Image (tube, helix red, strand yellow):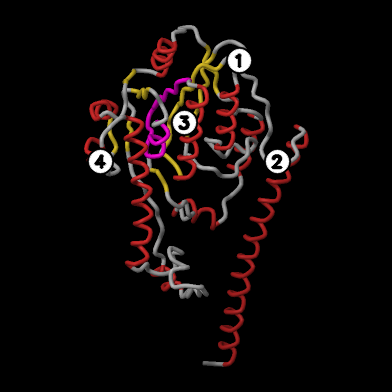
């Protein structure tokens, strides 16, 4: 090979490396600018609204007349950081707990109605919501109703165990009693890419489930024990909430999902209705006040800004990392009372 050809190849290789590195740097910088710009814009609108930081504070104005507090549990039950301005959550855990506290203090509140459309959520947050609902019942002696709109799976069924009556839409599905924890074995992918992770740990199981190596049977067994323990807790809650024996519920507690009619036959729900309005009528008659007010939790503040931010975010190109995370859903969710809807 002539010297000119060698020089040309070397120059081409150098240019290839430089261009590739530049492209990566540009993407990283663009992502940083995108995040910074979004935060600065949100901070600006927060300043206009007189909000310093964190979530937008509000004073819930509860009705002066007798009312039933409607709590919407839509989306995944989880306690994650979110913003009312960005509109990135369907369920706000801490606000829901605070609202239940407010209902406990209210002299005009007569009951709670859970409106459910949820695949479930994390074990800890599902249990925390359940315990708060049970606290409401114990402190006030007032009833709780659960209405399952289109689906209420796993953690969604778990929280319904606090209800005195469970009402399901005739087209709803429910169940999925069980526990799941998911991870990925990406060791094969790492090997193909020539990536060799190095974990310096204090013990052989410290890096388990980090995805860069195949898990041993011993490590899988450890998590299986934890899953089994959480599953037994789930069964205990269901038996208490529905008044069922272990023999009655365990055959159906394998993660299976049931239609509203089948769920009623098994004893998982109490009533089936055609519409949400039918459910409201049923609850009102149970309370003994057919014209009673149903007051939803006030969560829709900054609606105009929320829509604006969602529109703006949809116009911003996603980074390769964001696309990969959305496609593979690699974030660690831990132990879940959860099922894909």
Q: CA distance from mark 1 to mark 3?
A: 23 Å
Q: CA distance from mark 2 to mark 1?
A: 32 Å
Residue labelled with disc 1:
63
Residue labelled with disc 2:
42
Q: Regarding mark 2 in the picture, which secondary structure is present there?
A: helix
Q: Which span of residues is magenta-colored?
A: 142-160
Residue labelled with disc 3:
134
The correct choice, above or below, for 26 with respect to 93 in the image is: below
- Can you tell which of label 2 and label 4 is closer to the viewer? 4
Q: Position of residue 206 (x, y in %)?
A: 47, 68
Q: Position of residue 19 (x, y in %)?
A: 62, 70
Q: Quadrant of residue 62?
A: top right
State yes or no: residue 146 in magenta: yes
Which numbered disc, 1 or 3, marks the residue that appears first in the sequence?
Answer: 1
Extreme residue toward the bottom, this view: 2
Q: Quadrant of residue 18?
A: bottom right
Q: CA distance from mark 3 to mark 4?
A: 23 Å
Q: Say whether marks 2 and 4 touch (CB < 8 Å).
A: no
Nearer to us in this view, 137 or 222: 137
Which numbered disc, 3 or 4, marks the residue that appears first in the sequence?
Answer: 3
Image check: 333 left or right of 232?
A: right
Mark 3 surroundings: few (<14), some (14-19) or many (≥20) residues within 10 A: some
Q: CA distance from mark 2 to mark 4?
A: 49 Å
Q: Say whether marks 1 and 3 touch (CB < 8 Å).
A: no
Q: CA distance from mark 2 to mark 3?
A: 37 Å
């Amino acid at each position: 090979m002539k010297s000119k050809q060698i020089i040309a190849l070397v120059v081409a290789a150098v240019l290839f490396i430089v261009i590739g590195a530049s492209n990566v740097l540009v993407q990283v910088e663009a992502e940083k600018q995108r995040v910074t710009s979004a935060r600065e814009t949100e901070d600006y609108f927060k300043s206009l609204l007189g909000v310093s930081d964190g979530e937008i504070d509000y004073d819930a104005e509860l009705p002066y007349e007798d009312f039933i507090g409607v709590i919407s549990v839509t989306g995944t039950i989880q306690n994650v950081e979110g913003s009312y301005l960005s509109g990135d959550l369907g369920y706000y855990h801490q606000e829901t707990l605070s609202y239940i506290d407010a209902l406990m203090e209210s002299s005009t509140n007569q009951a709670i109605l859970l409106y459910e459309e949820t695949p479930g959520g994390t074990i800890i947050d599902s249990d925390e919501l359940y315990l708060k609902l049970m606290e409401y019942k114990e402190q006030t002696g007032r009833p709780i109703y659960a209405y399952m709109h289109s689906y209420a799976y796993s953690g969604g069924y778990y929280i319904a165990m606090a209800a005195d009556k469970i009402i399901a839409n005739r087209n709803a599905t429910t169940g999925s009693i069980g526990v799941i924890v998911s991870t990925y074995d990406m060791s094969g992918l790492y090997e193909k890419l020539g990536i060799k992770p190095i974990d310096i740990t204090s013990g052989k199981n410290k890096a388990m489930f980090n995805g860069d190596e195949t898990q041993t049977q011993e490590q899988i067994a450890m998590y299986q024990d934890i899953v089994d323990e959480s599953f037994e807790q789930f069964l205990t809650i269901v038996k208490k909430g529905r008044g069922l024996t272990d023999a009655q519920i365990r055959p159906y507690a394998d993660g299976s999902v049931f239609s509203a009619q089948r769920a009623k036959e098994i004893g998982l729900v109490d009533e089936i209705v055609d519409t949400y309005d039918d459910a409201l009528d049923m609850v009102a008659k149970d309370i003994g006040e057919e014209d009673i007010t149903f007051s939803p939790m006030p969560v829709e503040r900054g609606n105009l800004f929320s829509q604006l931010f969602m529109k703006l975010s949809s116009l911003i190109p996603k980074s390769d990392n964001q696309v990969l995370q959305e496609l593979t859903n690699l974030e660690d969710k831990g132990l879940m009372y959860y099922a894909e809807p």
